[in-house]
Image: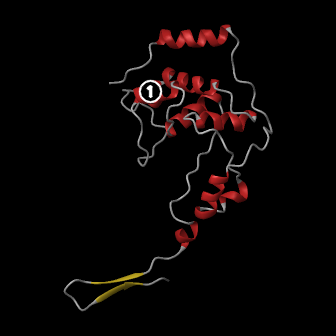
């Protein structure tokens, strides 16, 4: 099943945006530093400190609109451009083949089986509802809606020094006198 928002509703929203001359401004070249998110800094210090060499986590209000607030902060230096959420919802509604994995003409841009993709109706409803959860598909839709590339980063769940350490270990086969080992080098 690939339900979509009726095209008349999409056209109505687009007409309202056009009538009231509502559009996103051109993003600022340097939107300002924003307030550092110390919790994110602490997490990165513990799990991947090298990220802090090039990136600076910025605090956004955690009210369920954090994706759209973060994009607004990065683009304009303020978290108040809620139009980004509407444009993201319209992107998903207007191009269901790109976001609905059950669509007969689905275009898989993600091509990553590690991601669990949301059902289309849930994806669209979440994009259109203030305070609702956002997922990777919303990031892709927002990127397309505003015409910019975004990067999303989730640190590993173990400190980075463990990711480069060789594994070593040993075990004894049950009922055997033979011990097995694998070397560190």
User: Image quadrant of residue 44?
Assistant: bottom right
Q: Residue furthest toward the bottom? A: 177
User: Image quadrant of residue 1?
Assistant: top left
1 horizontally vs 91: left or right? left
Is 88 placed above or below 51 here?
Answer: above
User: Image quadrant of residue 183?
Assistant: bottom left
- Measuring 70% from the left and 52% from the top, which residue is drawn there? 55
Query: Which residue is identified by label 1?
Result: 97
Pinpoint residue 58: horizontal percent, then vertical percent.
Answer: 69, 46
117 horizontally vs 129: left or right? left
Is 181 placed above or below 106 here?
Answer: below
Pinpoint residue 42: horizontal percent, then vertical percent.
Answer: 63, 58
Mark 1 Cα-neighbour bin, 10 Å: few <14, some 14–19, many ≥20: some
Q: How is the image coloured?
A: secondary structure
What element does badge 1 sit on?
A: helix
- Measuring 41% from the left and 30% from the top, which residue is drawn there? 106
């Amino acid at each position: 099943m690939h339900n979509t928002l009726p095209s008349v509703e999409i056209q109505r929203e687009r007409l309202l945006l056009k009538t009231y001359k509502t559009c996103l401004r051109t993003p600022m070249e340097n939107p300002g530093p924003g307030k550092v998110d110390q919790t994110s800094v602490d997490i990165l210090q513990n799990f991947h400190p090298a990220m802090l060499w090039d990136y600076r986590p910025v605090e956004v209000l955690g009210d369920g609109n954090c994706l759209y607030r973060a994009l607004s902060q990065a683009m304009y230096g303020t978290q108040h451009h809620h139009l980004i959420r509407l444009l993201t919802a319209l992107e998903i509604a207007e191009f269901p083949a790109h976001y609905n994995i059950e669509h007969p003409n689905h275009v898989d841009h993600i091509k990553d089986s590690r991601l669990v993709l949301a059902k289309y109706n849930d994806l669209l409803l979440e994009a259109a509802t203030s305070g609702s959860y956002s997922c990777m598909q919303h990031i892709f839709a927002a990127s397309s809606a505003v015409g910019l590339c975004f990067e999303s980063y989730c640190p590993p769940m173990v400190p980075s020094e463990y990711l480069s350490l060789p594994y070593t270990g040993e075990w004894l086969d049950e009922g055997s006198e033979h011990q097995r080992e694998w070397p560190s080098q």
